Amino acid sequence: MGEEARVSPLKNFVAGGVAGACLLLAGHPLDTIKVRLQTQPKAPCAQYVLYRGTYDCFRKTVTKEGVLGLYKGMGAPLAGVAPMMAISFFGFGLGKQLQQPDPNKPLTHTQIFLSGCLGGVFTTVIVAPGERIKCLLQVQASGGSSRYAGPVDCAIRLYKTQGIRSVYKGTVLTLIRDVPSNGLYFLTYEVLKNFLTPEGQSVSQLSTPKILLAGGIAGILNWTIALPPDVLKSNFQTAPDGKYRGVVDVLRTLLREEGPKSLYKGFNAVFLRAFPANAACFLGFEVALKGLNAFVPSL
Ligand SMILES: CC(=O)O[C@H](CC(=O)[O-])C[N+](C)(C)C
């Protein structure tokens, strides 16, 4: 693999930022639904459940809060997703460069996977606090209370009351979610890009529908392994302090109270979102990269 020209980590960083903005705009409404479904309180019987499913959650959110309700909690990701994807693409590019001293020697699948994993390690520094704040805001809106006025207020209060540990609550689960899924994400995209490139053509000439297809599938596969740790993370990060003793305790509690199916809570919302959001993400990346190559080739 790898007849593609080598892209500098800096170009990956800038184009990754554009990719992140596209990902957020296309995916945030379904992300709100996902978090609300994942964290809704367990009802004594089906009749009292707050949201009966993806459509029910969508309908109730729009009826109660308007369409903008779907964009609740977007302040933190807005400031977080673009840099997160910028760092993710940067880490991926750096990982590839570190493992490929000779640009003419193609990388193996394992090396591509490991490059993606490196991106996942780097992003955790900003993703863990970003997710903590985002989930708290999404859940408080769904519960009807407004303890935090917004992302900055939330970050300040968490920091003031319990320090940096509270802001970074859920870091281990974020690593468990993002390191392997990042590896699979980039590996899938690169493999599909090569597969979809007609014989004798360069991968950089891939058509828009094929980029969308490769990006969308990469997003879906990424979530098949990211969803169970994501459910644990959302529950852990939004739980009152002291409710869980740690990662294993959240897993045990969820399995005991709601069974193994609970690890795929929010499945419909996640998979409905994954394809369009990640298709938009990779298209944004490729378009931005073409722009950078044309206007700032030396970057
Ligand atoms: C698990 C996750 O956040 O996936 C990201 C894409 C998405 O659908 O939000 C991509 N990445 C694996 C780079 C974090």
Image: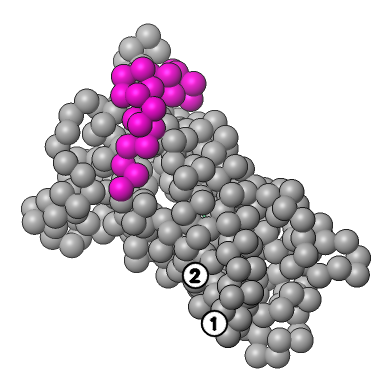
- The CA span between labels 2 and 1 is 10 Å
> Disc 2 on helix, strand or loop?
helix
Q: Name the residue under label 1.
A: 299
Is any part of residue 166 visible from this angle?
yes
Q: Residue 25: horizontal and vertical position, in percent? A: 47, 45
Choose top left, top right, bottom left or bottom right for residue 191. bottom right
Q: Which colour scheme is used?
A: one colour
Residue at the farthest bottom position? 102
Residue at the farthest left position? 161
> Disc 1 on helix, strand or loop?
loop
Q: Residue 146: horizontal and vertical position, in percent? A: 17, 33
Residue at the farthest front position? 295
Q: Which amino acid does label 1 sit on?
A: Leu
Left or right of 171? Residue 4 is right
Left or right of 65? Residue 87 is right
Marks 2/1 in contact by CB < 8 Å: the verdict is yes
Q: Residues within 10 Å of mark 2 (few under 14, many from 20)?
A: many
Q: Which amino acid does label 2 sit on?
A: Val
Q: Residue 29: horizontal and vertical position, in percent? A: 44, 36
The N terminus: image quadrant: bottom right
Is residue 63 inside the magenta stretch? yes
Left or right of 134? Residue 288 is right
Residue at the farthest top position? 47
Task: Please state which of residues 20 and 173 is positioned toward the viewer in this rendering.
Answer: 20
Is residue 69 inside the magenta stretch? yes
- Write the start and end of the magenta stretch as one range: 51-75
Q: Which residue is drawn at 49% across and 42% down?
A: 27
Choose top left, top right, bottom left or bottom right for residue 204. bottom right
Q: Residue 14 carries which label?
A: 2
